[in-house]
Amino acid sequence: MKSHTRYLTFQTPERFGLLNITDTVHDAVRESGVQEGLCLVNAMHITASVFINDDEPGLHADYRKWLETLAPFDPSPQRYAHNRTGEDNADAHMKRQIMGREVVVAITRGKLDFGPWEQIFYGEFDGKRPKRVLVKIIGE
Amino acid sequence: MKSHTRYLTFQTPERFGLLNITDTVHDAVRESGVQEGLCLVNAMHITASVFINDDEPGLHADYRKWLETLAPFDPSPQRYAHNRTGEDNADAHMKRQIMGREVVVAITRGKLDFGPWEQIFYGEFDGKRPKRVLVKIIGE
Amino acid sequence: MKSHTRYLTFQTPERFGLLNITDTVHDAVRESGVQEGLCLVNAMHITASVFINDDEPGLHADYRKWLETLAPFDPSPQRYAHNRTGEDNADAHMKRQIMGREVVVAITRGKLDFGPWEQIFYGEFDGKRPKRVLVKIIGE
């Protein structure tokens, strides 16, 4: 069994940001030499996500608006008890649960085994600082 | 290490549909010959889900109603910017994030290692056309 | 390839409860002897979750309140068709979809490869009875 580990770092200029990281994950798969296996990609921070969806700017604007409706940003400790700790990012911990922490992608014949529109995104809900993503590949 | 890959295709008669695919995934595990390992099952399309829950028609009706509340179908581009592209399925991209893209299931002694009520479902939120699901098994 | 399987049982005194199970999963990784691999941790019941987030009591109170807003407890069969079966836990099946069934965590140099704040939680939405969690580790 082969394994390969890679750490990526991202910093978004705003609190909210969605970055297409598919090519970088493809590179890690190529480096691994794995032909058949699994590729885990996860946010290492708890106010961020890794998810798979479409690379369409309108959809990304929709996600932003929709997540804001489900878990509005509110730095006050009245709405979110977490913000009594001095944090202002309780909403980001909620948004991350909707969008998910990780994806597991099959590797077949040395490539990410994707449907026609699948793209891997890093989803940032409390940005403006460097945060890490882990890529772990196992297989043969 | 053994690996096994299988592609399934589903077409639901309506936009929304939940299909129990547990037996088909069981078949793939049997074919693989894997006794101890992991089984990834994921939607290859970005307006569909694979998830694990109960096979109870009332619950499925509840999911349908609940998802419609959280992310209502609305083909107009006023509510969803994604629908400016000519698509009408922005809501389906949201519903899929709630229900999730994939499940990873343990294989123990040659079988999906399930709790008493766990069943694997394909969740379709923009149906009426053929869409694919990937089953990837690795182990020994 | 090595594999290791462990079943954990939890019973929360109330319907809702979040338990930090990180140390127990760490123990299972140590037992497995796996240095490089993947660790799956999943709820075996369909009204419970395994998820990764912060161990902060304010945040946990926020999750409880937030999930109640998105999918309110209501034993009546008027709101949830599932409750016509004699169950009263349809809301718990919804909450579990938001929080997720499982996490997959990388194992690197014999340890769970975590970011600074990542902790694994068992999320119970219909407690007061024993329920199981599966830990499955594969690697080398």
Image: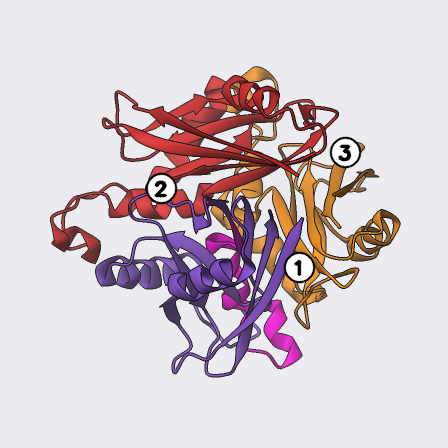
Chain colours: A red, B orange, C purple
Name the kind of residue labelled 2 in the image: Thr
Residue A60 in view of the camera: yes
Check if residue C82 falls in the magenta segment.
yes
Query: How far separated are the C-alphas under marks 3 and 1?
Result: 20 Å
Q: Are marks 3 and 1 on the same chain?
A: yes
Dot 2 crowding, Cα within 10 Å, few <14, some 14–19, many 20+: few
- Do the residues at pointers 1 and 2 share their chain? no
Residue C132, position as x, y percentages in the image: 56, 73
Which residue is at the front of the view, C67 or A121? Answer: A121
Q: Chain of mark 1?
A: B
Residue at mark 2: A69
Which is in the foreground here, disc 3 or disc 1? 3
Magenta stretch in the rendered image:
C81-104
Q: Secondary structure at mark 1?
A: helix
Name the magenta segment's main secondary structure. Answer: helix
Query: Answer yes or no: do the residues labelled 3 and 1 have beta carbons within 8 Å?
Result: no
Q: Which label lies toward us, 2 or 3?
A: 3
Q: Which residue is disc 1 drawn over?
A: B60
The chain carrying label 3 is B
Label 3 Cα crowd, 10 Å radius (few <14 / some 14-19 / many 20+): many
Measure the alpha-carbon separation of dots 2 and 3: 30 Å
Determine which of the numbered discs, if any, sits on residue B131 in the image.
3
Q: Is residue A3 above or below residue B31?
A: above
Instruction: Say whether residue C86 is left or right of residue A133.
Output: right
Q: Quadrant of residue C26?
A: bottom left
